[in-house]
């Protein structure tokens, strides 16, 4: 099926729900295509996806509504064989309160709707831009991969690539794990070719990347390392002292150079200004 060229806005709960209650795992991309839609003035999550085989592309998601407070994500999903690409997310912050979550939150096995591995997920070529100043206490985040549900099994073939993050106050990307998670649970997870510019603000307890390693056996590294999770070829840049490039790795917050040395990640990094301005918010269509 296809859902295209629609506007979704001002609903009392989630704006869009692409849901499947069966405990089964899809085996193909593109079963449902959701594209060229605009979603705005959302109060709960803008989109929830549990339908395996969803392609979500060329959509614009922006601006939370004003008449109800909630703790929304842009997209919260827990499905496999899911592609999220070529979308434009901007200006989720509200000036009156801090109840916000992530642009995208992937939490497989949430609500026990996924019976099996978290697999074949691709998040790429998206723009995430936040130009509004956050309030104190804001924990608004970029992409969160939450492998922390009690029913979690394995994660494999998950790619977050070629995305641009500008202005997110708390962190750019997070891989959340359980304390008992092992390297045997993770394979072929790639975080690559992303641009993080001014994504964490000093004073917000923020870091650019949060990389959990479970019981210590989850290995991170660059290409050719054989690591469970590859973090390489990303551009991480702070334009001023207002922002930071610190990383949370192995349970400790550290400077960027220390992270590279200890983890073996980012062997092919880009540290110069990517020349991405925070004016994406004026755009009216996806890139």
Image (cartoon, grey):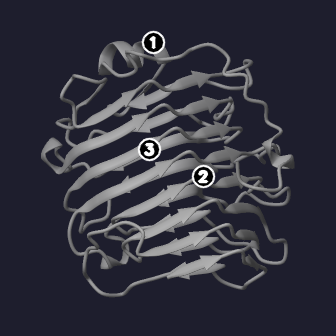
Left or right position of 184 against 191: left
Q: Give the x, y percent position of residue 120.
A: 31, 57
Question: Taking 257 as reference, is 168 above or below it?
Answer: below
**Label 2 – label 1 distance at C-alpha:** 31 Å
Badge 1, how many Cα within 10 Å: few under 14, some, many 20+?
Answer: few
Residue drawn at (45%, 59%) of the image? 83
Q: Quadrant of residue 14?
A: bottom right
For residue 72, say whether it is visible. Answer: yes
Residue denoted by label 1? 257
Element class at badge 1: helix
Residue denoted by label 3? 160
Earlier residue among tags 2 and 3 = 2
Earlier residue among tags 1 and 3 = 3
Q: Quadrant of residue 275?
A: top right
Earlier residue among tags 2 and 1 = 2
Residue denoted by label 2? 86
Element class at badge 2: loop
Residue drawn at (67%, 42%) of the image? 168
Q: Give the x, y percent position of residue 166.
A: 69, 37
């Amino acid at each position: 099926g296809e859902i295209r060229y629609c506007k979704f806005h001002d609903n009392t709960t989630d704006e869009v729900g692409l849901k499947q209650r069966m405990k089964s795992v899809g085996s193909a991309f593109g079963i449902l295509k959701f594209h060229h839609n605009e979603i705005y003035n959302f109060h709960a999550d803008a989109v929830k996806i549990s339908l395996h085989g969803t392609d979500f592309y060329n959509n614009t998601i922006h601006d939370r509504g004003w008449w109800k407070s909630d703790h929304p994500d842009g997209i919260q999903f827990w499905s496999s064989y899911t592609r999220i690409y070529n979308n434009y997310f901007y200006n989720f912050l509200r000036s009156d309160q801090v109840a916000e979550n992530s642009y995208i939150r992937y939490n497989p096995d949430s609500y026990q709707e996924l019976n099996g591995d978290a697999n074949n997920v691709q998040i790429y070529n998206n723009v995430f831009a936040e130009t509004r100043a956050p309030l104190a206490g804001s924990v608004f985040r970029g992409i969160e991969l939450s492998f922390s549900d009690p029913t979690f099994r394995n994660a494999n073939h998950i790619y977050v690539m070629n995305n641009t993050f500008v202005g997110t106050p708390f962190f750019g990307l997070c891989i959340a794990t359980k304390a008992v998670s092992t390297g045997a649970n993770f394979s072929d997870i790639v975080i690559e070719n992303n641009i993080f510019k001014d994504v964490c603000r000093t004073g917000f307890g923020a870091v650019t990347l949060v990389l959990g390693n479970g019981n210590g056996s989850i290995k991170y590294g660059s290409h050719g390392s054989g690591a469970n999770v590859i973090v390489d070829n990303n551009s991480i840049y702070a334009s001023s002292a207002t922002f930071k490039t610190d990383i949370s790795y192995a349970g400790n917050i550290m400077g960027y150079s220390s992270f590279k040395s200890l983890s073996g990640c980012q062997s092919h990094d880009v540290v110069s200004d990517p020349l991405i301005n925070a004016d994406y918010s004026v755009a009216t269509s996806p890139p």
